[in-house]
Amino acid sequence: MRFFALSCASSILILAASTSLFAQGRGGRGGPPPTPQAAARIDITGYWVSLVTEDWRYRQFTPPKGDYESVPINPAGKKVADAWDPAKDEAAGEQCKAYGAAGLMRMPTHLHITWQDDRTLKLETDAGTQTRIFHFGPAQGAGGDWQGVSSATWDYPEPEVRTGFGGIDFGFELPPAPGGSLKVVTTKMKPGYLRKNGVPYGAGTVMTEYFDRYDIPGGDTLLLVTSEVNDPEYLTNPFWTSTHFKKQDDASGWNPTPCLSR
Amino acid sequence: MKVTRTVLLILFVLAMRAKLSAQFRPPPAFDIDITGYWTPPLHEDGLERGNGPEIADYGGFALNEAGRLFALSYDPSRLTLRYHQCDGYIMPYQMRAVGNFRTWEERDPHTQQLIALHWWAQTTEGNRTIYMDGRAHPPAWAPHSFTGFSTGHFVGNSLVINTTHLKQGWLRRNGSPESDQATVTEFVTRHGDHLTDTTVITDPVYLTEPEVRSNDYVRQPGDHHVWLYACDDGEEITGRAPDVVPNYLFGKQPFAKEYSEKYKLPLIATLGGAETLYPGWAAKAKSATQAEALAKLQPAPNQPAETSKAINPEPHDGEIHVLHIRDNVYMLLGDGGNIVVQTGDEGAFLVDSGEGKLSDKVIAAIRRISQRPIQFIANTSFHADHIGGNAKLAAAGSDPSLPGSFFDLQSPGAATGLLFDPAHHATIMAQNNVVFRMEAAKMSSEMVPADTYLEERRRKFQNGELVELFYEPNAITDGDSIVHFRRSDVIAVGDIFTTTQYPFIDLKNGGSVQGEIKALDDILSRTGYEHDENGGTYIVPGHGYLSDEHEVTEYRDMVVIVRDRVQAMMKAGATLDQIKAARVTADYDTRYGANSGPWTTAMFIEAVYNSLKQPPAKLSAEK
């Protein structure tokens, strides 16, 4: 009886080993892992332009003081927003408070996204002439400026589903999905504005963004930037927005402008 | 021995692995799970999605001139009309609405293949089905609904959905329109417990470029148990005439400046258009003059009339296409006007006979769905595209109720010239004026109805249900009928209502805009919806796709609004040429307009003008 149990156990081990080895064999062992640039399954580089179809009044124009409709702002945040004084910001040389990472992508703007090197994406905006750096791997830099420190990863739809029978893998491998997202986590931002009218975010803000690319009928391509802003200082809940951009063939319309505080 | 047993066991396990491997095939592509309960955080456009939008706030919508004028003409009081009180939300707006959502899968019980995803919206009980089994979209002549017809497939980490067959509705609750020609592509992407649905709306009628919006949802842990949104219409304003549709004349929208003044925005900035979507718009808007802005509140003068951007839903491939409507009632398309066929134990009952160019194919199609010959053909008018097949279709049928009857004995193809061996000839029915018009037009006697009625209605119990013909005086002509199949709840209405053009008001043959509006209201008085102005009574138009009361309501609104504009200008002393130059149909021309062909926009305006100038005597007397 004991021998039979041992036999069963060894069979399962053999099965598991064969599965494991099979899976390893498919994994493409050997050689260094591809660089983030080489591993990219979606291409988000190039010129893009905002499509301001949502929160239109708040984004195309500067809303009046105290207009924080839709933002899950807490009493401390309201207090700051109600005290918004663009002249004071200008005097302090802080015209770019609405152009920090947590507010920048909502601006009507053009984007220019390039690979700075094979581990680093650079995102430039003509609105406010800002630059964001997305570094793959551990966050780099001390932060403390408007754009903070951004750490990037590819968020691929690796299936967690098992293709076999319960816990037993029969060796199937799902075909790799052609798509995926760029995930960017940004921290260490200088406190700024979610909206131009002084709706604030604080120094402890953590922003998680997903960049997705969609090809739409008619030949256009969209870039969707889904953003979750977590700010324990001024928000009651995570602030969710999704902002879209249309691909451009070239730099037409690219018009770098300085930050405007009003 | 023990070793042998061990080896056998290992071999058995490996064999089982191979066998099971053969049985369990991996899915063809990676898919994402969007099932569960979802709530939109409303962190974008929260005010308009919650409490409601401001009037004349169209910024961010790539509206063309027609779309902007439609929105400016829209009076929210229109929702007090019975037939608008329970309007559902069209799908792109539904996905943006306040309220919770629930999604679930439908799988084939035998193969476990994914058939569809279902998406239930708390607000208006929007009930979407997204077919995932690769089926094709229905033909262009199939009915439209508020949720439309959706098919989906997975691409990368997204669910891509294509939707067609939407009803007319709004992009925003202030009248910013979306037409029934709109199609939508969606990309649904899930990141953890956050779902984003990006909708790309293409509308050739009211938009100059696709409208992109993205809706966010946060996953909920469970069911909140509040899913119903029952709506029944009622009387909100009593004593109002049935031909009243609240609307603002062009240039007379009293609240057009309210939004811009409230937020100190340039007026031109708020009136929509593709330019309002892009960077730099604020500066451009600020530099525009007030005159430029005010000019956008009415049609641009001295412009040629726009023409329809709608897809013609009628097949023109030389074949007859059969659409099953409900129970034993079918719609046949392809030979001019739509034909309705009711089948059953008795002979087939037809409404109209088409243009007559493809009658042999019509007869063949009817024989495929009816075991019995054609017994009755009811004509909705005498227009050629509805009676052209009378002779051939009638000759292919028979009316067994006639041989030996009084009619047969009295006029066996002689006295009246209308009966031709009834045993081998279907009976053609119509309002009596159809006969006069056909005879005046010297049409072949074989085409002329033998069974006529004069007033109100003609009843017939055929194939297990009551079939009623109702007379609609002075609508398209002076001999129009609508035909109601009572049990099947299908009404064939001829050219009183089409989805393809402005109403063909044939003034010289007794038509009038007053009668047309009354006829449309009569149709609506006989309809019911299944849920939120969707489904229920089916309406077979003279031309175009199978409809329900919502399409008739929108069409009625259009005719009333155009009449109001023409009437207002006539009261102000305008001539017909001045009315035409004012482009009084500018917000509908991209949907129904034509500058050539048998029925142009100018002819429609002229018919409205002339009927108002000289109203039909009968309707005037009734009034």
Image (cartoon, coloured by chain):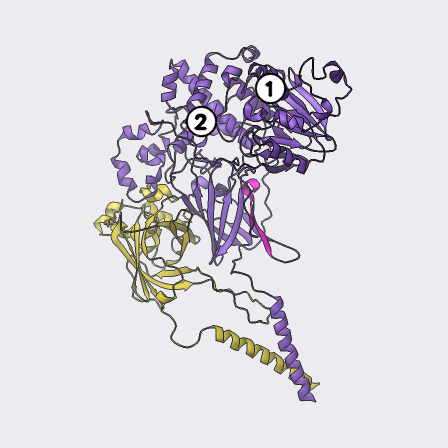
Chain colours: A yellow, B purple
Residue B444's label in the rendered image is 1
Range shown magenta: B113-132
Residue A228 in view of the camera? no
* N-terminal label among 1 and 2: 1
Q: Which residue is located at x 27 percent, y 55 percent?
A: A130
Task: Relative to A22, say whether B535 is above or below.
Answer: above
Q: Position of residue B78 (x, y in %)?
A: 49, 28
Q: Position of residue B590 (x, y in %)?
A: 42, 32
In depth, the one of B104 and A60 nearer the eye is B104
Local secondary structure at mark 1: loop
- Magenta region, mostly helix, strand or loop? strand
Task: Relative to B118, say whether B554 is above or below.
Answer: above
Q: Residues within 10 Å of mark 2 (few under 14, many from 20)?
A: few
Answer yes or no: do the residues labelled 1 and 2 have beta carbons within 8 Å? no
Q: Position of residue B173 (x, y in %)?
A: 46, 36
Residue B432's label in the rendered image is none
Rendered image quadrant of residue B458: top right
Q: Answer whether residue B118 is magenta in the image.
A: yes
In depth, the one of B401 and A231 nearer the eye is B401
Q: Which of the image's four quarters has the C terminus of chain B? A: top right
Q: Tell me how far mark 1 sits from mark 2, CA to CA.
A: 26 Å
Residue B19 in view of the camera? yes
**Left or right of B337, for residue B5:** right
Q: Residue furthest bottom?
A: B1
In depth, the one of B254 and B72 nearer the eye is B72
Q: Residues within 10 Å of mark 1 (few under 14, many from 20)?
A: few
Local secondary structure at mark 2: loop
Label 1 marks which chain's residue? Answer: B
Q: Which residue is mark 2?
A: B597
**Left or right of B504, for residue A201:** left
User: Label 1 sits on what residue type?
Assistant: Ser
User: Label 2 sits on what residue type?
Assistant: Gly
